[in-house]
Image: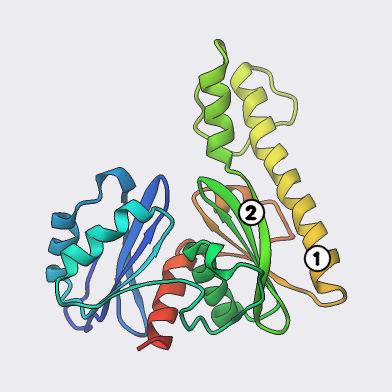
Amino acid sequence: MPGRSPNEKRRYLLVDVSNSFTKLAFASREKLGATERIATAHLSAAGIRKLIRKGAVEEVIVSSVVPKKNALFRRAAGKIPVAFVSAKSELGVGVDYPKPASIGADRLANAAAVAALYGCPAVVVDFGTAVTFDVVSAKRCYIGGVIAPGLDAMTTYLYKRTALLPRLSLTEPRRAVGRSTKGAMMSGAVFGYRGLVKEILAKISAEAFGRHKARVVATGGYARLIAARMPEIDAVQADLTLQGLRIIGNLNR
């Protein structure tokens, strides 16, 4: 379960609900605790209620892209407030977007976090089930982004749709020219994905920033692997979305 120091008062339970996995952490106003990741399909009101009681939680802050799970949090929390992040929340950044209600809550949390922790303009590259690019302008406004298939989704698709290609556990390839089926797939996945990320970042920079230098921050499951040899990415922050929820919680007290 998410870790908790006995000497530090916990105010929040932060929850980032994505399609495949959910990340949770206790947090004070100033500090994020240890995180836990569980399969979203396994979320239950009983499990959430147990966490709330364990952490002496005063408020639950949720970013969710799985609406059918949202009722679990209200049921588990009882009289404890539950805040679901949306474009109507105070984010610390503006929202300059045609249909604000359609923006994923995790993307808004990422925008809030990158603006507060790294400054603007900025781009967050979130390597989740999909890889998302979220753009915050020099005027501290969320202005949109890009959505592409996630790395795991791409490799799993190959495994499921071809008779002879194996399931991969991704690591840094030794060479571009694969000397085995796995080596060839690894090269295509990692080097190919870096190419995708590099091209999209170049297009975003030319279109949105002009002469401004934007901070590019990566987060999500494969962030460290893909960012390792990409000078375009300035920082990797594994818990950026949860940090954004902590920041949003503070702004909406």
Quadrant of the frame with the N terminus: bottom left
- Quadrant (top left, top right, bottom left, bottom right) of the C terminus: bottom left
**Quadrant of the image occupied by residue 118:** bottom right
Name the N-terminal-most of marks 2 and 1. 1
Work out how far the residue at label 2 is from the one at label 1, CA to CA, in angstroms.
17 Å
* x and y, in percent, of residue 155 in the image: 57, 30
126 with respect to 50 (left or right): right
In the picture of the structure, the residue carrying the numbered disc 2 is 227
Identify which residue is drawn at 46% across, 73% down. 244
Spot occupied by residue 159 in the image (x, y as percentages of width and height): 53, 22
Q: Is residue 47 left or right of residue 16?
A: left
Please state the horizontal and vertical placement of residue 10, each as a whole percent of the image: 23, 80
Which residue is found at the position 21% from the left and 75% from the top?
5
Q: Quadrant of residue 49?
A: bottom left
Checking the image for residue 205, the label placed there is 1
Label 2: element kind: helix
Residue 182: numbered disc: none
The residue lying at 26 percent from left, 59 percent from top is 71
Residue 230 seen by the camera: yes
Q: In this orientation, which residue lies closer to the viewer: 251 or 36?
A: 251
